[in-house]
Amino acid sequence: MAELIKIYTTTVCPYCVKAKAFLKSKGFNFVEIDVNKDRKAAQEMVKLSGQSGVPVIEIGDVIIVGFDEEEIENALKNLRR
């Protein structure tokens, strides 16, 4: 399922750490993209989310900006179906 979940992060973002830990605690794999190291990915993230803040989490067709456990949980439930 890693290809279905992407998380755009930076190394200095505490909410990115929390979001990754939350996904791992739920047993989900994901692709982490450090937008400080990948300019093209940073542009892709802004196009998806409309902003440059991290984390941006892409779960299937759902884009979540920031770390919101409830939103993430709902998106994960839909992904399981």
Image: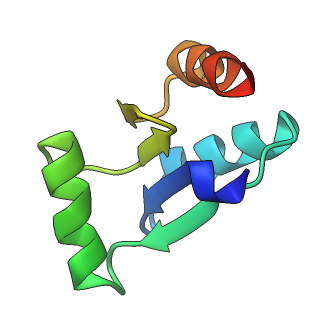
Residue 61 place in picture, x, y as percent:
42, 34
Residue 9 place in picture, x, y as percent:
44, 62
In the displayed structure, would residue 72 be above or below residue 34?
A: above
- Work out which quarter of the rendered image holds the C terminus and state it: top right
Can residue 13 be seen here? The reply is no
User: Relative to residue 22, is residue 38 drawn left or right?
Assistant: left
Q: Nearer the viewer, residue 51 or 14?
A: 51
Residue lying at 72% horizontally and 37% vertically, measured from the top left: 22
Can residue 56 be seen here? The reply is yes
In the displayed structure, would residue 37 be above or below residue 32?
A: below
- Residue 46 lies in quadrant: bottom left
Q: Nearer the viewer, residue 36 or 14?
A: 36
Residue lying at 60% horizontally and 64% vertically, measured from the top left: 31
User: Relative to residue 23, is residue 6 drawn left or right?
Assistant: left
Return the residue found at the far front.
81
User: Relative to residue 71, is residue 49 drawn left or right?
Assistant: left
In the displayed structure, would residue 32 be above or below residue 71?
A: below
Residue 7 place in picture, x, y as percent:
50, 54
Residue lying at 59% horizontally and 13% vertically, measured from the top left: 74
Residue lying at 65% horizontally and 27% vertically, measured from the top left: 79
